[in-house]
Image (cartoon, grey):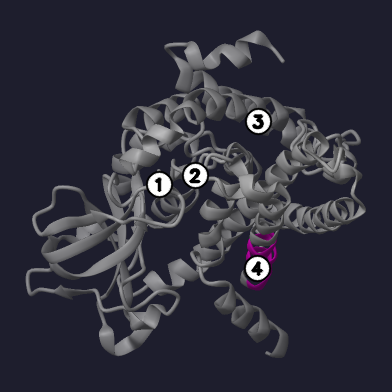
Amino acid sequence: MPVTHLSMLARPTTRHFARSVVKRSYSLIQEDANSSPFRTEPHSAKEMTDFGTRRIFNEEHDMFRETVRKFFDDHCKPYTAKWEKQGQVSRECWQQAGAAGLLGAATSVEYGGAGCDAKFSAVVWEEQAYSLCTGPGFFLHSDIVMPYIEHYGTEAQKQKFLPAMAAGEKIGAIAMTEPNAGSDLAGMKSHAVKEADGTYTLNGSKVFITNGAMADVTIVCAKTAPEKGPHGISLFLVETGMPGFSRGKNLDKMGMKAQDTSELFFDNVKLTEDNVLGKENHGFYYLMDELPQERLLIADMGVSQAEKVFEITRAYIKERKAFGKPLAALQTIRHTMAQLKTEICVARAFLDNCIELHARGKLDTATASMAKVIGTDLQHRVADECVQLHGGWGYMTEYPVCKAFLDGRVQKIYGGTNEVMKEVISRDIVR
């Protein structure tokens, strides 16, 4: 690994250097797309989290992955316990992530990003999953909020928000879920009334909003034509400090203690046309277009966490002794691990195909929904089995497998519950 690449985090021109590396990497990938050398797949690697594996990536991705892994090792892991007590990460961490080129990898260069495809984004969210540092909401900020603004925003909106978001100077959130409306967008009560002067008055509330406490800009979903049901939803860019916009408490969750998750309240918030994201009453269509990427990243983070927890447990059963010999000497434990590895490797193959499809703009809603079901169900099952294999120690929150179990439980819920995902998949089957 070149010293210049590994040491880039310490440089004063870090962000520009990092983005140039990622941009150069992407151009090399495009040139070499049809001549990638053979790469070991995770099922035959020494460890499933090893560098240099998986045929969807190449050496340039590996270079970036090493940088990202080093970032989480140096700038997140040492502070996770502190952040969990505070209920949120530091602003400094966000700025460091921006300087290192971790934010907005897929955002166009003209708006402060690196102009890369989904594979570079996948490297970042996978490495966050491997690190078990669930506090920073980088994935939602970079791969959900920023794409909405780039895809549907005006030039003025893009220039106002995206460069600052890529630098980690502004944090983004998206607010869809309400106290009585989760996966069912039609049940949304938040509404924005268009006044005679062309302005909007926004009222309502949102709940379970990731990055909600720290966000500088929030994409808010609200009905502008209630009589049209979900087809009367619009998206608004609401900035912190706007009169009538307030936050409730930072919610106390089962897991992801360092990730700020908040209630948001809108009491006669005055908005103008400049706050409308995209076209009025087109919000539902935008949401449907962007949800596949959200479900893909949730699924891929799920499989990545499963890979990491498996490797932690593999090391544990080789060291921990019972009845005078390592746990790994017991057939029942070996067979449990064999089953877990088989399921993880099958899921990884499917997820890598989905990442490839997404990078080519061909990932459909049903396939992304399958990925979410497979990835998050597996994540929960692997964490549960690995807690069991750790025995009493697995129940202690100081142990990584316990933290993974608690943090990962929400994956089957957000981004659309897995029950709803199965309904989406079934519609594609019987249409």
Q: What amino acid does circle 3 point to?
A: Arg
SS for dot 3: helix
The answer to which of marks 2 and 3 sits earlier in the sequence is 3
The span from disc 2 to disc 3 (Cα, nearest Å) is 18 Å
Q: Are marks 4 and 2 in contact (CB under 8 Å)?
A: no
Q: Nearer the viewer, residue 339 or 221?
A: 339
SS for dot 2: loop
User: In the rendered image of this protein, does residue 109 appear above or below residue 268?
Assistant: above
Q: Which mark is residue 134?
A: 2
The span from disc 3 to disc 4 (Cα, nearest Å) is 26 Å
Residue to which mark 4 is pinned: 373
Identified at 64% across, 57% down, the residue is 361
Mark 2, other Cα within 10 Å: few <14 / some 14–19 / many ≥20: many
The span from disc 3 to disc 1 (Cα, nearest Å) is 23 Å
Position of residue 4 measured from the top left corner of the image (x, y, whole percent): 61, 10
Identified at 56% across, 23% down, the residue is 20
Q: Are marks 3 and 4 in contact (CB under 8 Å)?
A: no
Q: Quadrant of residue 193?
A: bottom left
Q: Quadrant of residue 186?
A: bottom left
The answer to which of marks 1 and 4 sits earlier in the sequence is 1
Residue to which mark 1 is pinned: 259
The span from disc 2 to disc 1 (Cα, nearest Å) is 7 Å
